[in-house]
Amino acid sequence: MHTLAKKIMREDQFPMVFCPGCGDGTITHLVGIAIDELGIIDDVCTVGGVGCSGWLASIFNVDFFKAIHGRTLPVAIALKLTRPSRKVLVFTGDGDCAAIGGNHFLHACHKNIDLTVVMINNQIYGMTGGQVAPTTPLGSTTPTSPYGKIEPALDLCKVAEAAGASFVSRWTTAHPKQLLRTLKKAIMHPGLAYVEVITQCPVQSGRYVHGSGDPVHLLKWIRENSLTKTQMEKLSPEERAGKMLIGDFLEEIRPEFTAKTYQFMAEVQASKKASVDLGR
Amino acid sequence: MVVASKEGTVKIVQGNGACVEGALIAGCRFYAGYPITPSSEIAEEMARRLPLLGGICLQMEDELASINALAGASWGGWKAMTATSGPGFCLMQEGIGMAASMETPCVIVNVQRGGPGSGQSTAPAQGDVFQARYGSNGDYPMISLAPSDAQEFFDLTIRAFNLSEKFRTPVTILADEMVGHTRESIYIPPVEEIEIINRKYPTVPKDKFLTYMPDPDDLVPPMPAFNDGYRCVVTSQVHTEGGWRADGAQAAKLIQRLIDKVERQIDYITDVESQWIDDADMAVISYGAPMRSAIRAVIDARERGMKVGWMKLRTLWPFPAKQVQEVAQQVKWILVPEMNVGRMVLEVERVAHGACEVIPVPKFGGRCHTPGDIFKPIKETYR
């Protein structure tokens, strides 16, 4: 077995559950490298959602919580608050995060709580059989949008930024170097770090959205259609249709929820009111 | 910082306030909730008190978030609680089933109000008693306690935490609007007289630890906190002893153990109080706020020479079958007043099994029985 896998991952969980050609293996590998290079494995715990991406959280040899569908972030928030030294890594999918867990996503971002949220965007409900997701491109036909998707794909990076996340990035499985660099920064960022990873799903979105189950073809498609801000600006509005914006969009140091909570707690305890409240 | 004092104290509080006192003494240091009448005073008092004790009180975006935050806090190593009412209790059901399956200690208080739907936010009801038992999907154990006054709300909140920690399972407290909002005196015993139970910690070497390996005596697995080095595998799926997804036989084994760890200790868990049963021809069995009217009605009946006794159920789930069965074999009639269309009366009927006549005394629509509402059927039935 690979030395990194031996060091960072649960050997008994190999071979992985992902379909052949799935991008989740690439992301697992990169997160593993990031944890190893940062030397933080004892402080890491993972929270996985429901969907293919949730199982990504299970591979690492750390405490692992597999939440019910959509509820990763409330669990993660409580894990962070009950021991602030924890590095809580959340692995969620586009259905888990943007649809059923959308409200929790808004409020976790709004808290700017120190979590790393890796959102694996395969643009479809993979595990349940390829149904349409909020992130599925406009017009796509899927088993539950047989006549084409009516609304455009939801841009969760914009949502994260608007809601108050202080670190927002989007990369793809076709950009492993950039993604690794961003993951390392995101994990160490003191605030809510949202990292979206667009990934190929040969079995579902490949088949339904892109008309190909070939992972190489799909990776090429991702590479050709994901553009940086500079590249995007060179295109006319018509040419931009269907293109995905990638890059590190936001990185700011802002007040963080856990630190603030403990600071408030200390202040309240120190104040005169505290002694009155406790004296019974 | 101590919560209970060395000497006992008397306080005048709302039932909801008594619940907070009990929770803080039991060691609750994490609260996550969403405002909902008639439970909100619990959240407000927790918000004021918890930071003083090094605890954390969060107002979440909804009840889904609240129950899941409890699970996170519990695996973070803290004792955690939420309080809600019917509509919020509905939203929590998936999380409660998850907590039962994940064997995650936590306490859920439901200060019941009228239903269904948004129901009657400021009126009492007991319509959620079956939801508390069967509200989540699949088979799972449930412990539910029902206070009938502020003192019991205090006592049972401590007991709820103790049972939750001992059996590693969510425990629900089914209060009602009247119990939650009635302001009355409670006695807080000296701290050394209060029994506090904490979850078992693993004793095996860290590399031999399996997240769901139960101890043979009580079928409860020891529980570390996350990042203590045990590398827990906590999955919402039905799981093996290692925590991974189970096959059919493994799933059946887990579900059976979850049920058995509670059912085998039913005598320890179930808690009833009774009076005048020994010579009684008739018994009134109730719980929560209607119990108080029931006791008054029974006293009135006794004063008129009718041999009537009463039994108060402080534990609703697991149902105190043995205790109710004994009453059923003693008396000719059992009356069951409750603020719903007749729920727990079905359980009484089941365990009475024809030994006596079981008569529902329902009252719903947001009002509690008066003593007269219960005295009337006593008088009409008693021959």
Image (tube, coloured by chain):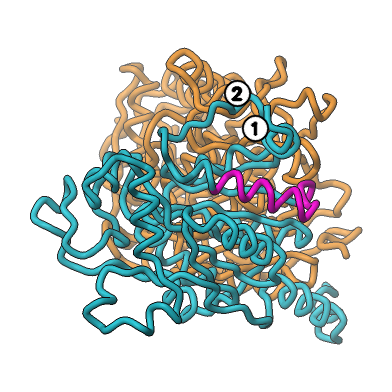
Residue B305 in sight from this viewpoint:
no
The N terminus of chain B - image quarter: bottom right
Q: Position of residue B18 (x, y in %)?
A: 65, 62
Residue at the spot x=78%, y=78% of the render? A263
Position of A188 relative to A253 (above/below): above
Residue at the spot x=85%, y=46% of the render? B193
Query: Does residue B206 appear to the left or right of B15 in the view shown?
Result: right
| Amino acid type of the residue tagged 1 in the rendering | Phe
How far apart are labels 2 and 1 at the CA level? 7 Å
User: Which residue was labeled with disc 1?
Assistant: B167
Q: Position of residue A9 (x, y in %)?
A: 67, 36
Give whichever of A86, B299 is nearer the camera: A86
Label 2: state its secondary structure.
helix
Query: Does residue B95 appear to the left or right of B226 in the view shown?
Result: left
**Residue bounds of the magenta highlight:** A27-43
Confirm or deny contact between disc 2 and disc 1 (CB under 8 A).
Answer: yes
| Amino acid type of the residue tagged 2 in the rendering | Lys
Label 1: chain letter: B
Position of A28 relative to A116 (above/below): above
Q: Which chain is cyan?
A: A
User: Which residue was labeled with disc 2?
Assistant: B261
Furthest residue toward left: A147
